[in-house]
Image: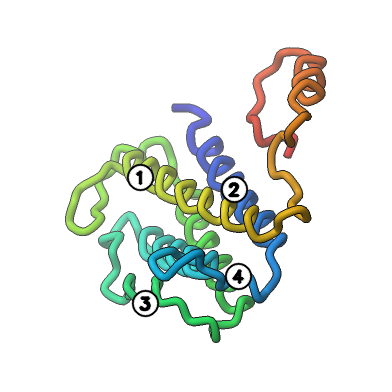
Amino acid sequence: MQGYLPGIIKQFQYYKNLADKAMAQVADEQFHWQPDEASNSIATIVKHMAGNMRSRWTDFLRTDGEKPWRNREAEFTAEPTTDRAAILQDWEQGWECLFDALSPLTDTDLKRIIYIRNEGHTVLEAIHRQLAHYPYHVGQIVYLARMLAQDRWQSLSIPRGGSEAFNAERFGKDKERRHFTDSL
């Protein structure tokens, strides 16, 4: 397990970075756009993720991950009057809560039992649960941002037609142990 926690933190940072870069390409008036009434806007997804992060990671070794103060249903209420800056401030606070909770963990902590809605998880299982949940929503944010930005979109990965050059650059380096996010 040596190196597990630093690698997991890098994974979470990677997904936050993807969402941040995608949202930066969306105009303020597009931040609340919904494809239809049953779909979520970027703003709604961000509110949900921020609420989830604050609930799951606040005092997560000692209290249930679904906090009594969380109002999950309100996270899905699309309020176009909610200021983008305020929503993004909540987003940053949610990520800060996650990173503050993960940073001091040790490999021994990974075996501890924590609860989410009274269901026991090892800390390792809880981390994996959230590492599946957040990228699911980050993909939604990226997809919506890509649709909204249209021809102004700046690729967040290897752009179409760029695979050969990307692979040549990567295979041009010596083999070494590194995290794929190190060069991002």
Q: In the rendered view, does 31 fall on the left or right side of 183? A: left
Tell me: residue 92, above or below residue 112. Answer: below
The kind of residue on which mark 1 rests is: Arg
For the question of whether residue 109 can be seen, the reply is no
**Which residue is most to the left?**
118
- Amino acid bearing label 4: Phe
Q: Which residue is mark 3?
A: 74
Which residue is identified by label 4? 31
Image mark for residue 138: none
From the top left corner, tell me how far across and down residue 132 is, in percent: 41, 43
Circles 4 and 1: CB atoms closer than 8 Å = no
At label 3, counting other C-alpha atoms closer than 10 Å, the crowd grade (few under 14, some 14-19, many 20 or more) is: few
Tell which of 144 and 74 is nearer to you: 144
Which residue is the site of mark 2?
A: 13
Q: Earlier in the sequence, mark 3 or mark 1?
A: 3
Of labels 4 and 2, the one closer to you: 4
Name the mark on residue 129.
1
Q: Is residue 142 visible?
A: yes
Q: Secondary structure at mark 4?
A: loop
Quarter holding the C terminus is: top right
Q: CA distance from mark 4 to mark 2?
A: 22 Å
- The answer to whether marks 4 and 2 mark residues whose Cβ atoms lie closer than 8 Å is no
State which tag comes first along the sequence, 3 or 2: 2
Percent x, y of residue 91: 54, 66
Three-letter code for the amino acid on which mark 2 is drawn: Gln
Q: Earlier in the sequence, mark 4 or mark 3?
A: 4
Residue most extreme to the bottom: 81
x 58%, y 66%: residue: 92
Instruction: Identify the residue at image location x=70%, y=17%.
Output: 176
Q: CA distance from mark 3 to mark 2?
A: 26 Å
Q: Position of residue 177 (x, y in %)?
A: 65, 20
Going from the N terminus, do you reach mark 2 or mark 1 first? Answer: 2
